[in-house]
Image: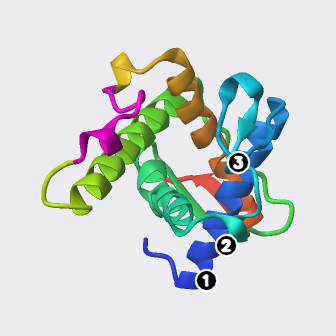
Amino acid sequence: MGFEKQQLEKLAEAAHEVFCDGLRAKGYRYGPVTRDRDKEHSSLKPYSKLAEEEKQQNRNNVQDIPRKLASIGYAMRLCCRNEPTAEFSKDEVDNLAKMEHDRWMQQKLAATARRGKTIDQAKTRHKDLVPWDQLSQGGQDKDRALVKGIPSILAKAGYTVVKRSK
C-alpha cells in the first residue's frame, strides 16, 4: 500500500507525536542534544521543526506499517466513528518490534552507504545496530513501544487497525 504525499505526511506527523508523547510520559523534555541521563531529547519539538532526515525517518516508519500489519494478519482501513481498534498480543508486539528493528537497521546502513563510496565508520556506529537477540532490553523496549503506538498513529490520521478475515 503506497500512501499519497498528504496521507504520508499526516501519518509521519502522527508517528512523531506518538513518539513525543511516549518520551514525555517518561519525563523527558526538549534539549538541544539527546541526553538520556538528563531526560532531554532533541526531537521533542513539533514535526514541522524537525530536520528533513528526521522527517524521512518518520515517513519510512509509517510506510512500512501496512507490511508489518499484514505479517500478523491485520490491516489498516479508514476509520468509522467510534470504531474499536484491534489490540496486539504480546507475541504480535514482539514480532512487529523485531520487524521494525530490522527495517530501522537496513535504513540506517543504506543511508550511510549512500553518503559516499566508502562507509564512514563514525556514522555507522550506533549501539543499537546489532541483531535483535543482541539488542539491549532498553533497545527492544523502544521498538516495542513504537509498534504498540501503531493504532494511535493510525487513529490520529483517521485510520484503524482491523483483523483481516480469513
Type of residue at label 2?
Answer: Lys
Q: Secondary structure at mark 1?
A: helix
Judging by the rendered image, the residue that carries numbered circle 1 is 6
Residue 83 seen in this snapshot: yes
Dot 3 alpha-carbon crowd within 10 angstroms: few under 14, some 14 to 19, many 20 or more: few
Judging by the rendered image, the residue that carries numbered circle 2 is 10
Residue 39 image position (x, y, % from top left):
76, 30
Label 2 and label 3: CA atoms lie apart by 25 Å
Mark 2 or mark 3: which comes first in sequence? 2
Q: Is residue 35 left or right of residue 80?
A: left
Residue 148 image position (x, y, % from top left):
64, 39
Type of residue at label 3?
Answer: Pro
Dot 2 alpha-carbon crowd within 10 angstroms: few under 14, some 14 to 19, many 20 or more: some
Quadrant in the picture for the N terminus: bottom left
Q: Residue 126 appears in which quarter of the rendering?
A: top left
The residues colored magenta run: 120-131
Residue 166 seen in this snapshot: no
Q: Secondary structure at mark 3?
A: loop
Q: Is residue 73 above or below residue 92?
A: below
In the foreground, 109 or 119: 119
Judging by the rendered image, the residue that carries numbered circle 3 is 32
Dot 1 alpha-carbon crowd within 10 angstroms: few under 14, some 14 to 19, many 20 or more: few
Residue 127 in the magenta stretch? The answer is yes
Image marks 2 and 1: residues in contact by CB distance under 8 Å: yes
